[in-house]
Amino acid sequence: MEATVPGDKPIFERVLLKLSGEALMGEQGFGVDPAMASRIAEEIAELHAIGVQVAATVGGGNIVRGISVSAAGMDRVSGDYMGMLATVINALALQNALERLHVFTRVQSAIEMKEVAEPYIRRRAIRHLEKGRVVIFAAGTGNPYFSTDTAAALRAMEIGAEVILKATKVDGIYDSDPMKNPSAVLFRSLTYREVLEKDLRVMDTTAVTLCMENKMPIAVFNLLRRGNILDVVMGKSVGSVVRL
């Protein structure tokens, strides 16, 4: 992600948007808020309308988080598979919201379930993007012990995305939790090593390391502020960037 001057054209042709399951909750305490799913879909549709190829991954924390149920006493592998299935529910919700805006989509699942999603096939995913479809990746990597952060990094590399757009509830990467510390400092730019050494929890260690080894930039921004996704793709100074 080189320094660029914002203009009338997007600075990326293909992006991967990483959404948390919690993003789909909106103001609810659980599940999917249709209004929030629609709002996110509208922003994705804006990218699609200007010719940006968009892939997305969605977490499942609004329904079940594998590591949480494991901490409560459930078998970790079973918990992780439950979390993967939750991401499929969220992917279908986002697909529905996009298709109501007349944006063609495909959901690809790392766990085979032919009735509701295509199996993940890298070449097919790339072809869908080339044909102007939004591709939503579900079920993580299909393996327990790997987070949706790692799945997002892996899929971004596999499809040749130019950047990972990491949507959060805060304005970017801070030196401490801004929800708890009003004096937290926002970093505009960081290297991968700084993220790892400072333990900033932008994404999990495996995902950040994978991005570092493959020189995949990570743009972190506030999803709750309308228009931020488009602004990042247009090269405006929004949020934080992790790069070499």
Image: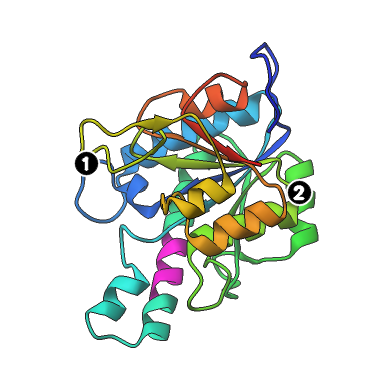
Answer yes or no: is residue 137 visible. no
Residue position for label 1? 27
Colour scheme of the rendered structure = rainbow
Badge 1 amino acid: Glu
Which image quadrant is residue 164 in?
Answer: top right
Q: Nearer the viewer, residue 74 or 221?
A: 221
- Say if 97 sits above or below 82 in the image: above
Q: CA distance from mark 1 to mark 2?
A: 34 Å
Answer yes or no: is residue 126 visible. yes
**177 relative to 144 in the view: left or right:** left
Magenta stretch: includes residue 208: no
- Label 2, secondary structure: give it: loop
Magenta stretch: includes residue 86: yes
**239 relative to 215 in the view: left or right:** left
* Chain part drawn in magenta: 82-89
Residue position for label 2? 160
Chief secondary structure of the magenta span? Answer: helix
Pointer 1 with pointer 2, Cβ within 8 A: no
Residue 95 screen position, x and y as percent: 51, 48
Badge 2 amino acid: Gly
